């Protein structure tokens, strides 16, 4: 016996990826509904060898459905998620709307799977920010061994993190570099993204940080340990898919780089590729389409007593969004709903 499952926002990048991952992981689905706004009504999407037509989100009745994976913006989620939850359908939301709600668990299954048990408070579970998701997968096993005091992270985030418009803008601007007549000014981003990097993701806050940076701080504390101090600089780079992070970690006690490497090799969801030679590390191009969070460049930080540096790369459309949502559904099914 499987689940009656809904994918909301099935025509978007993340929604389509959710469908791919549900099929790849053979999630036990008895019935699947794919929903979209009226502008995309009737659009066909693929689920394995099946082709499904989207239904109207505005008129859909969530009564009797088990789980809804939401891959729409916060404004639409604010309207429709409570409707689904009130009908008894557990919402797994990919937007930022509920991440900071104390009554909504924020879950990365490799890190805090037990948090799904709190879903009942609002019948909603939140998916973290893409940059946070991959980082906490790397941090948690190290925190369990040596307790993390402070994290300094610089991100190198792909344009797919801003949606299809970001992908199109990088593609169009890259072509226009070689054809100056066809100029493509910045629209999705604040400056040219082709052959450039932009130290600005989301809106600026009063203290000079951006909201993306603030998200990494608050979410890491909620998922792992509220005592961890985090400071982040988030940068958009001209990469289509795959977020990278340079992470500096300060521990309460000494952790040798070799032991850290061994711990990470055994950690769920992590793949260590760390050879001190040309090409002995993972780049965003190589992580696309993979489930793992890849860790490279593990080394001691000699400037502090108990420090490590590492390089972290993951497919942001997968672990940063669709995969994590499906893993939450799997965890919910195993620990709570117990079907399939």
Image (cartoon, helix red, strand yellow):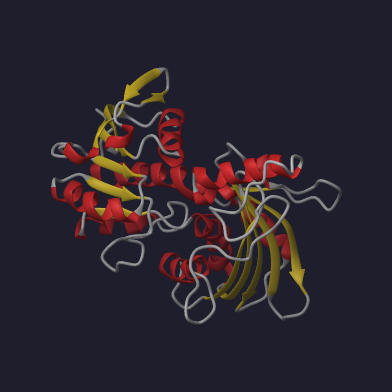
Left or right, 52 with reference to 140: left
In the rendered image, the vertical position of residue 146 relative to residue 92, given as above or below: below
Left or right, 276 with reference to 131: right
Q: Nearer the viewer, residue 195 or 134?
A: 195
Residue at 58%, 58% (x, y): give it: 138
Quadrant occupied by the C terminus: top left
Residue 304 percent coordinates (x, y): 72, 80
| Residue 160 in view | yes
Residue at 39%, 41% (x, y): give it: 326
Residue extending farthest right? 277
Residue 119 placement: quadrant: bottom left
| Residue 269 in view | no
Residue at 46%, 29% (x, y): give it: 24
Residue 238 percent coordinates (x, y): 67, 50
Residue 68 placement: quadrant: top left
Residue 285 percent coordinates (x, y): 68, 41
Residue at 51%, 82% (x, y): give it: 207
Residue 9 percent coordinates (x, y): 35, 40
Quadrant occupied by the N terminus: top left
Q: Nearer the viewer, residue 242 or 249?
A: 242
In the rendered image, the vertical position of residue 255 relative to residue 315, given as above or below: below
In the rendered image, the vertical position of residue 174 relative to residue 196, given as above or below: above
In the rendered image, the vertical position of residue 151 relative to residue 192, given as above or below: below
């Amino acid at each position: 016996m499987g689940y009656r499952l809904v994918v909301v926002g099935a025509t978007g990048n993340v929604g389509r990826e959710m469908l791919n991952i549900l099929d790849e992981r053979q999630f036990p689905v008895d019935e699947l509904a794919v929903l979209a706004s009226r502008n995309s009504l009737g659009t066909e999407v693929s689920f394995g060898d099946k082709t499904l037509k989207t239904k109207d989100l505005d008129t859909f009745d969530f009564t009797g459905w088990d789980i809804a994976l939401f891959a729409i913006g916060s404004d639409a989620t604010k309207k429709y998620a409570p409707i689904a939850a009130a009908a008894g359908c557990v919402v797994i939301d990919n937007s930022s709307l509920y991440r900071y709600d104390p009554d909504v668990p924020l879950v990365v299954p490799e890190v805090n799977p037990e948090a799904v048990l709190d879903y009942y408070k609002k019948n909603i579970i939140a998916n973290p920010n893409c940059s946070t998701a991959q980082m906490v997968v790397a941090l948690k096993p190290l925190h369990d061994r040596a307790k993390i005091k402070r994290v300094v992270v610089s991100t190198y985030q792909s344009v797919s993190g801003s949606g299809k418009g970001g992908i199109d803008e990088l593609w169009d601007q890259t072509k226009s570099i070689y054809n100056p007549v066809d100029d493509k000014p910045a629209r999705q981003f604040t400056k040219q993204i082709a052959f450039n990097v932009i130290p600005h993701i989301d809106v600026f806050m009063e203290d000079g940080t951006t909201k993306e940076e603030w998200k990494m701080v608050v979410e890491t504390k909620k998922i792992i340990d509220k005592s961890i101090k985090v400071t982040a600089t988030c940068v958009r780079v001209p990469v289509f898919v795959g977020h990278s992070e340079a992470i500096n970690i300060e521990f309460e006690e000494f952790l040798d780089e070799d032991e850290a490497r061994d711990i990470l090799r055994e950690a769920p969801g992590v793949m260590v590729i760390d050879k001190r030679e040309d090409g002995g590390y993972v780049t965003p191009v190589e992580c696309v389409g993979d489930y793992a969070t890849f860790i490279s460049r593990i080394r001691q930080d000699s400037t502090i007593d108990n420090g490590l540096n590492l390089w972290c790369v993951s497919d942001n459309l997968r672990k940063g969004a669709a995969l994590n949502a499906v893993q939450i559904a799997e965890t919910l099914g195993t620990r709570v709903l117990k079907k399939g």
